[in-house]
Amino acid sequence: MQYTITLAMLAGLTGVLAAGNNVQTFTGDLGGAAPPVIEDDTSDRPFSVNGATFLNKGAALQRSCAVQHNACAAVANGGSADVAVSDCDAQEDDCNAAAGAAKKRAALDFGDCANPAIEFAPQADRGNADAFAAVDQTDFNHGSANNINVISGFICSQLASSCNAAQDAVDACDDAQAAANGLSGQDAADAFNDALGVSA
């Protein structure tokens, strides 16, 4: 009997260890808690948030804060008298500050290209409707898109090829793309830019 209990306990412990360690320490819960950031040292992309994986902790924490912000904003926009979107914005700032994700990362080497930032703004090729576009159309010449992944994917591809960017910049771009994935509008552009330490 004791042998069976020990095996069951070990199986449970193995499951906990396999799941990794939650490194998200922010405790604010306006609109719900920030999703966990799971660190798994056995993975080549060791940080994950809701299934999205990241190479560095800062990008994963920033994504966690952004997901919490969107959930909070949904509550505020749903008519809750107790929550305003400005409260959600302030909470996201606090979450990023607690994680250290608001700090600019060390300057990345983008090679022959200058600024890989993405803007969400009125675009002439879309009849002045808001859409995503690369800010630097000289180095990242591409039309606008309604889906940020079209633009972020192009920028990351250019960094890896024609820009001759350093590998850490290419990896950071992949993290930035993952950070923006699933977000919309300005939130998506901000997540991408913040993860790269650039601005539109």
Image: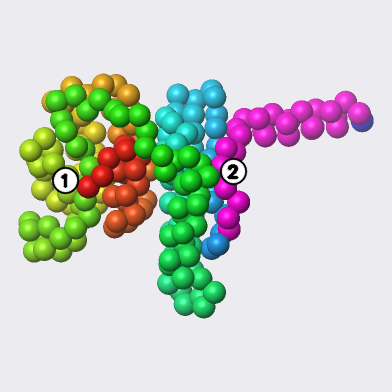
Q: Is the stretch drawn in magenta largely helix, strand or loop?
A: helix
Q: Is residue 13 magenta?
A: yes
Q: In 3D space, how far apart are the residues under numbered discs 1 and 2 (Cα atoms)?
A: 34 Å
Residue span colored magenta: 2-29
The label number, if any, that marks residue 95 in the structure image: none
Location of residue 42 (image quadrant): top right
Residue 104 appearing in the image = yes
Relative image position of residue 114 (x, y in whole percent):
16, 33
Badge 1 vs badge 2, beta-carbon distance below 8 Å = no
Q: Is residue 191 left or right of residue 53?
A: left
Residue drawn at 50 percent across, 52 percent down? 94
Residue drawn at 73 percent across, 31 percent down? 13
The label number, if any, that marks residue 25 in the structure image: 2
Q: What element carries label 1?
A: loop
Relative image position of residue 66 (x, y in whole percent):
43, 51
| Amino acid found under the numbered disc labelled 1 | Val
Relative image position of residue 37 (x, y in whole percent):
53, 40
Of all residues, the one furthest to the right in this rendering is 1
Q: Is residue 169 left or right of residue 37?
A: left
| Residue on which disc 1 sits | 135
Mark 1 surroundings within 10 Å by alpha-carbon count, few (fewer than 14), some (14 through 19), many (20 or more):
some
Residue 64 appearing in the image = no
In this figure, what is the number of numbered marks?
2
Q: Is residue 17 magenta?
A: yes
| Nearer-N-terminus badge (1/2) | 2
Quadrant placement of the N terminus: top right
Residue drawn at 45 percent across, 36 percent down? 58
| Amino acid found under the numbered disc labelled 2 | Thr
Relative image position of residue 4 (x, y in whole percent):
85, 29
Between 134 and 108, the one nearer to me in the picture: 108
Q: Is residue 86 left or right of residue 22?
A: left
